[in-house]
Image (cartoon, rainbow, N blue to C red):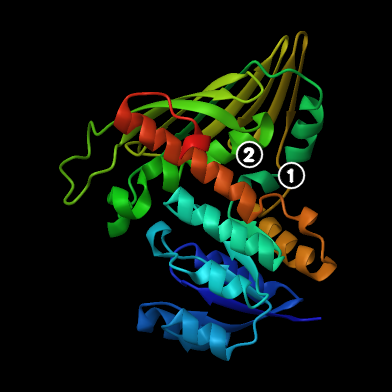
């Protein structure tokens, strides 16, 4: 069976997904949509698809099996509801939006439609992740430490809080999600944010340094530090318990116990391809469990990061549940 694939948004990260869908033996890209007509036409030419500038017209005209939604955080409109109501399976890039209540409504519409969903949390597809999960099974986590340090993204909308949600929501969400994957959901977050270096950039109103303290529902505590002022890119997470720690430095896993240390390299050549292929296989097998981050799960990561923004604004700890 060959799945008919459509795209809404073909800039930036969409190019990665387009290549994977072109190379997957079980898929065919039939249509692409972008508000920039030239961009839609270019992608259509490159992938032998039909171009659109209006996603509603595309969904009405094209009998799609699956849709990749690769739009900026502020631009989701009713794409998910519209597609899900037609029985179209959904891959939604992270973050799944900016407004938590709107995303919750989308999640409910998707649940009612019964379609398979996936989201863009590719770190969950690192080859050693299941090894780390298995090691942590049954262990009591005491503390989780994480960081995401990078440079500034020049895309115009990225510097505007109302359009991107800031670095934590739009970018460092990868590591926030990774924390959740291993330690579970957070019950409260307290954040401090500041713009220390990049205020000279035109139209910028996002923080360039952020630190978030978390309390997890399990009782574990943690923190996440992120910034967009560095000359390079680094991320990692460290999960600590009594006499052990599980550490990711990028995609390299190290498990440390008293008297013993083991290191494991990631054996998945392309975690983004693994993520996309898992979505397609889940559709073909009618098995949503093959996907490691559904829309509903991605919503939880949005709730965590938006709660951190709310905490930084109010100066108090915020529970994701109260949003």
Which numbered circle lies on residue 232?
none
Q: Which residue is mark 2?
A: 251
- The x, y position of residue 216, in whole percent, is 59, 25
Q: Nearer the viewer, residue 203 or 88?
A: 88
Please tell me which residue is depicted at 73% across the width and 39% down the height of the picture. Answer: 129
Name the N-terminal-most of marks 2 and 1.
1
Q: Nearer the viewer, residue 106 or 205?
A: 106
Q: Which residue is mark 1?
A: 127
- The x, y position of residue 214, in whole percent, is 51, 24
Please tell me which residue is depicted at 28% across the width and 42% down the height of the picture. Answer: 206
Q: Is residue 94 above or below residue 195?
A: below
Dot 1: few (<14), some (14–19), or many (≥20) neighbours within 10 Å?
many
Please tell me which residue is depicted at 37% across the width and 77% down the height of the picture. Answer: 35
Q: Quadrant of the N terminus?
A: bottom right
Please give left or right for residue 202 compared with residue 162 in the image.
left
- The x, y position of residue 125, in whole percent, is 69, 48
Secondary element type, mark 2:
loop
Q: Nearer the viewer, residue 8 or 231?
A: 8
Q: Is residue 4 above or below residue 289?
A: below
Residue 104, can we see it? yes
Which image quarter: residue 252? top right
Dot 2: few (<14), some (14–19), or many (≥20) neighbours within 10 Å?
many
Q: Are marks 2 and 1 in contact (CB under 8 Å)?
A: yes
């Amino acid at each position: 069976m060959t799945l008919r694939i459509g795209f809404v948004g073909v800039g930036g990260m969409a190019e990665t997904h387009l290549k994977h869908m072109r190379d997957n033996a079980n898929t065919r890209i039939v249509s692409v949509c972008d508000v920039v007509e030239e961009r839609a036409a270019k992608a259509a030419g490159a992938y032998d698809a039909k171009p659109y500038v209006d996603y509603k017209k595309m969904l009405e005209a094209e009998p799609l099996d699956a849709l990749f939604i690769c739009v900026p955080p502020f631009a989701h409109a009713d794409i998910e509801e519209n597609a899900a109501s037609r029985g179209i399976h959904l891959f939604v890039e992270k973050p799944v939006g900016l407004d938590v209540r709107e995303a919750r409504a989308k999640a409910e519409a998707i649940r009612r439609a019964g379609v398979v969903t996936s989201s863009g949390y590719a770190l969950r597809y690192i080859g050693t992740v299941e090894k780390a999960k298995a090691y942590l099974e049954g262990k009591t986590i005491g503390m989780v430490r994480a960081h995401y340090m990078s440079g500034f993204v020049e895309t115009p909308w990225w510097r505007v809080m109302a359009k991107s949600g800031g670095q934590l929501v739009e970018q460092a969400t990868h590591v926030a999600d990774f924390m959740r994957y291993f330690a579970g959901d957070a019950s409260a977050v307290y954040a401090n944010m500041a713009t220390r270096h990049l205020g000279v950039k035109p139209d910028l109103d996002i923080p360039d340094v952020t630190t978030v303290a978390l309390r997890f529902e399990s009782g574990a505590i943690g923190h996440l530090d992120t910034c967009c002022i560095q000359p390079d890119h680094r991320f990692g997470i460290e999960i600590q318990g009594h006499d052990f720690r599980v550490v990711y430095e990028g995609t390299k896993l190290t498990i440390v116990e008293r008297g013993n240390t083991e290191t494991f390299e990631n054996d998945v050549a392309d975690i983004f391809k693994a993520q996309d292929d898992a979505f397609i296989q889940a559709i073909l097998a009618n098995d949503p469990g093959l996907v490691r981050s559904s829309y509903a799960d991605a919503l939880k990561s949005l709730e965590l990061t938006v709660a951190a923004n709310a905490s930084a604004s109010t100066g108090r700890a915020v529970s994701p549940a109260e949003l």
